[in-house]
Structures are given as C-alpha cells and as structure tokens.
Amino acid sequence: MNKRIVVVAGDGIGPDVCNEAIKVMERTAGKFGHRFTFEKHLFGGCSIDAYGVPLTDETLDACKRSDSVLLGAVGGPKWDGVEPSRRPEKGLLALRKGLGLFCNLRPAHIYPELKAASPLKDSIIADGLDIMIVRELTGGIYFGKRGSEGDYAFDTMEYHDGEIKRIVRKGFEIAMARGKRLCSVDKANVLATSRKWRGIVEETGKEFPEVQVSHLYVDNASMQLVRNPSQFDVIVTCNMFGDILSDEASQITGSIGMLPSASLGSGSLGMYEPIHGSAPDIAGKDIANPLATILSGAMMLRYSFGMAQEADAIEKAVATVLEKGYRTPDIMETGMQQVGTKEMGDLVAQEV
Ligand code: IPM
Ligand code: MG
C-alpha cells in the first residue's frame, strides 16, 4: 500500500522523536512491501515564529489531504507570553477540531522490564497494567463558550447527544476488542452533561450485552487508579476528565516517554502523537526517549491503515529492545545499556 503521512513535528524534542518514528516506519514499510511518504509541515511554536499563528491553513489542508498525521509535541516557555488565542495549544485544539478527531485513545501499559519505574508498590501492580482510556476530544469544556470580563470569567461544559453517542460507541467497540469491561467516568452527582452521558452509556450498553459496564465518579476513579489500577480495562470519559486521568495513568507506568496516543474521527484519517510534551530543555541533545512516538507510529498502522501485522512487528521490536536492556536516560536503571535517541531508533528499526 502507498500512504502519505504528514509530519507536524512541532517544537522542542518533537523533531528528535519524530525522526526516529519515521525511521522505524520506513523500515517497516520496506519489510512488508509498502511505500510511505512523509511530508513535513510547521506547527505550534515554530509556526508562530514563521507565520504568527500556530496552525496555518496550509498545514491544516495538508493534514486533511493526508492518509494520517504524525505529531511530535508543541509549545515551550518561549511562547508563554503569546496571547491566548494564538498559543501553540490553541493550534493543537484547532487541528483536532479541524480534522474531526473526536476519539482519543490513550493506552497505559506497563512493560514488565520497566516495572521498577512505577511509583506504585509492587503489590499494587503485581497483576500488571493494561488500560485504554477513550477520551472525547472535540467537545465539552474545551470547546464550550468562555469569556472573561473584569472580576468575572467563565467556561462552559456543553455536550449534544450525538457527540456523546459516537464516543461512547467507540468505547464499547474497543472494549469488545479487548477485555470486554467498560468503565464510564463522569460526575453525574453534580453535572447535567454527566447525567446525559450516563444515560447514553446505559442505552448503548443494550447493544453490547457482552460488555460489563460500570460507572465511576471522576474523583473516585482517580483514587481507584492508584489504589487498584488492574481493575480497569477500558475507560470512556469526557474531554477534560480524560485529559486529567490519562496523565495520572501515564505516571503509574512510571515513564511518560513510553506512551503513545491516537486521535480518530469517523474516517480512517487519524493523528498520532506521544503523550509527553516538548521538553525544550533536552531538545536536540539526542537524549529524548523516542519510543512513545515510535509506538504512536505503530498505532497509525493499526488504526488508520489496517496494518495489524506491521503494527505488531513494531510493538514487538520495542519490547525486544527493552528486553535486551537498552534504555534512554529517562528509563535508565543500573545494569542496563544507556543509548541516545537515534541509537534507540536504530535498534528498534533493526529489530523490525
Ligand atoms: C493533552 C494536552 C492538551 C490537552 C493541551 C496541550 C491543550 O494536555 O493532549 O493532553 O489538554 O488536550
Ligand atoms: Mg493533557
């Protein structure tokens, strides 16, 4: 298959880690007889520097025309003073919205080799950790009416039935493909949007009788995540709760440099990015961990291109490289072999 991938590497370590993902995807294409072309565009802070805005129409159009988008990371202290409507983060929200990517998949998975990096006690993670957070990405309080005047400011959490139905359905479909357990997280004891959400989960559940459904309030869910994380299989939740819970889940794995993500819409086009930030302090130093971005590339092959075997090959290569003891500085332990960003990319590519 021929696939056109737009790369918006962004700022800080974004380019460092994207280059390694490209390397691994090219090797995978070669091995399985595909052809991937990569087209790079400015996005985020570097786009503000060049054009005054974080997302130009050209970049958005290029993304829309692509088969999928690989994103590095955006932002950094350099653009902290930029007015809110032009901040790099605004560009990210506009890109998600512009591409219609309402479904954000954030897996949190502990590699047996990296268990020691988890801040949780061995007894709590003895059963491992393999959670998929399904986060609504183009609605809720992120996109509701907001404003600020004098001594008053407001944000609004808004959802229409349709927006909830499509993400909840995704949650069920993903649960069916995994452990068949779906936990819906809301704040239905307080929020009207959550009560609507809960009703739609119950209603949709009738179509998926095999899936065991539970509901948790978000405060309880955040507690359960550290008390007994292995109780979770798939979590489905709104934009803001998903933002918060996915950061919490990432820390349980001990290594934010390991976690990929996928943002999907109703078609095959998706956007794939590591969940970590731009880490400007280590940019260009060949020390950033490229594995989250490499694994995001694997998710692209799986979810947008239907290349399950190819995605497996990349994921297996990452596991093998870790088994062999290679570590970037963020996941380094005594007795292991420390390598830089590029060498890590080379090792995974070779293993593929
Ligand atoms: C994330 C980030 C973004 C979000 C920010 C940068 C706008 O925290 O992708 O989780 O809140 O969605
Ligand atoms: Mg976040």
Image (tube, rainbow, N blue to C red):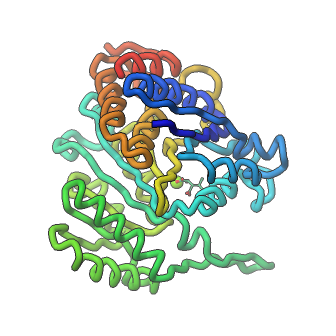
The answer to whether residue 289 is visible is no
The residue drawn where x is 33% and y is 64% is 171
The front one of 196 and 301 is: 301
The residue drawn where x is 25% and y is 46% is 129
The front one of 207 and 343 is: 207
The front one of 270 and 235 is: 270
Q: Position of residue 194 (x, y in %)?
A: 41, 80
The answer to whether residue 109 is visible is yes
Q: Position of residue 329 (x, y in %)?
A: 46, 23
The residue drawn where x is 79% and y is 52% is 53
Residue 120 quadrant: top left
Which quadrant holds the N terminus? top left
The front one of 272 and 285 is: 272
Q: Position of residue 265 (x, y in %)?
A: 49, 60
**Left-right relation of 69 to 193:** right
**Left-right relation of 311 to 176:** right
Which quadrant holds the C terminus? top left
Whether residue 143 is situated above or below residue 101 in the rendered picture: below
Give the quarter the ligand 1 occupies: bottom right
**Left-right relation of 112 to 248:** left
Whether residue 264 is situated above or below residue 79 in the rendered picture: below
Q: How many marks?
A: 0
Q: Position of residue 266 (x, y in %)?
A: 47, 63
Residue 42 quadrant: top right
Residue 73 quadrant: top right
